[in-house]
Amino acid sequence: MKHANATAKQEAAPSEMIAGDPIVRAAKADPFGDRIHTILFVLWAFALPLGMIPWAKDVVFGGLIIWSVLRATVGHVEYAWSGVPRSPLAWLLVLWLLWSSLSLTWSPNPAFGADQLGGLRMLIVPFAVWPVLRKWRMALGGFIIGGTLVAAVIVAQATGWVTSDRSHRFSASMSIWQAGMVCVTILLGHFLLAGVKPGAAAVVWHVGGVAIASTALVINATRSCWVAVIVVGIGSMLILIALTPTLRWRLFLIATAATAGLAIAATIDDAFLGSTGTKLVLRRTTPIIKQLEDSSQFTANRGTVNHRRKMWNGGRNMISQRPIAGWGLGGLSTGMLQHPGLKPAWPHLDAPINHEQFNPHSSYVYQGASTGLIGLALMLGTLVVALICMGLRVRNDPVVIVPLAMLSAWIVISAFEATLLAGFGVGALALFLTPAISRATQEPTEHLT
């Protein structure tokens, strides 16, 4: 009789009968499912930067969705998601997706808007990996390894070891700005981990990663990424120096070594490479200075400073016309038809702006014009809350500076690139948000490469 009563109690409400943290309980109740879930999370993060294999991240993403559903239904560990309603960031992401979906109802081009909504699919990742969200360190390590591979391919393309369809600004057969974002985020990751990760082997690996990523970043020559690495790199070092006194001496040595490395690289470039790197940097920076000095030079060449300025002005005008709800996803390009002067100067693209070629070159302009101030507030709210959550944890867990720096780089680059229009851009945002969404307690502290 006692055995029968105990069995009945266990079958009645397993999620309520088992005491303790729901995520820990789920891992103990379904260790095999937890292990596969973790592997899929890490594989997705590893595949995310591999733009030369664009289908890889989507295949693993699909696997994550299917496995999450199976664990919640067949595996009966649905209680692992019980903490979702208590997460402010989770609510912000849900509202962001819902408002973006709702905007299709007033979009003048809902078909194109549905395609743009599909780009936001990666914001579902934190929910799909919720039971293993605390293992974000392992996932971030996978991203750094995959990103380092991309940077190595870029360097190999520049040296002629790997074939490329480009003669300059190599990008590992992916979008140029996406390759640049990969390089800058893993460069920050390697550089900061060299300062906070103990062990000689870790330092050697990260110093090598810094050398590969920094070389690829120069070769890729994406100016927004250069701005991001300078601003975020300096800011991250200052945060670590202020909040982690025990690491100050090591950080000083790392910063000194980095400065010496730059001097050595410049010397090698001048003595043996014919100042190739220096000429590339000057070729990419000189036009900016000239165009900023002469604001009357307003030729709309795609990718130049002036073209961005014209796009930003056009987007600002569209926001002023529909400030609250915006034009809806897909409606931005329709609204830009009011500005027929916005067309590239290249002969093969000499046509009025349409939904296929319009690129606002700013995620903030895109978000504000497409979903109005409400949508922009949801996006900015997500970013600000995440920055605060991670910033408050750096003192007790210095490794958190890595995703904090990566998210900060994403924020800077998004001012100049339409990161929300690419699956990689949204996926990177979702990955960098995971440490802020995850609880600060009872997290594993190992496995960040």
Image (cartoon, rainbow, N blue to C red):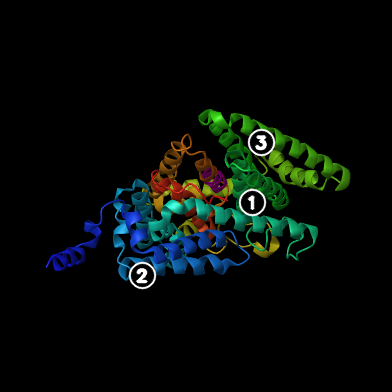
Determine which quarter of the picture holds residue 386.
Answer: top left
Q: Which mark is residue 183?
A: 1
Residue under pointer 2: 70
Q: Quick one: label 1, few (<14), some, or many (20+) residues within 10 Å?
A: many
- Three-letter code for the amino acid on which mark 2 is drawn: Leu
Residue under pointer 3: 254
Going from N to C along the chain, the mark reached first, 2 or 1, is: 2
The stretch of residues the image draws in magenta is 406-414
The x and y percentages for residue 102 are: 34, 59
As helix, strand or loop, the secondary structure at mark 2 comes to helix
Mark 1 in CB contact with mark 3 (< 8 angstroms) = no
Q: CA distance from mark 3 to mark 2?
A: 46 Å
Residue at 40% from the left image edge and 66% from the top image edge: 33
As helix, strand or loop, the secondary structure at mark 3 comes to helix
- Three-letter code for the amino acid on which mark 1 is drawn: Cys
The x and y percentages for residue 11 are: 20, 67
Q: Quick one: label 2, few (<14), some, or many (20+) residues within 10 Å?
A: some
Q: Quick one: label 3, few (<14), some, or many (20+) residues within 10 Å?
A: some
- Three-letter code for the amino acid on which mark 3 is drawn: Ile
Front position among marks 1 and 3: 3
In the foreground, 99 or 346: 99
Residue 73, visible in the rendered structure:
yes
Q: Is residue 366 left or right of residue 25?
A: right
Q: Is residue 265 left or right of residue 359?
A: right
Residue at 37% from the left image edge and 59% from the top image edge: 27
Q: Is residue 272 above or below residue 351?
A: above
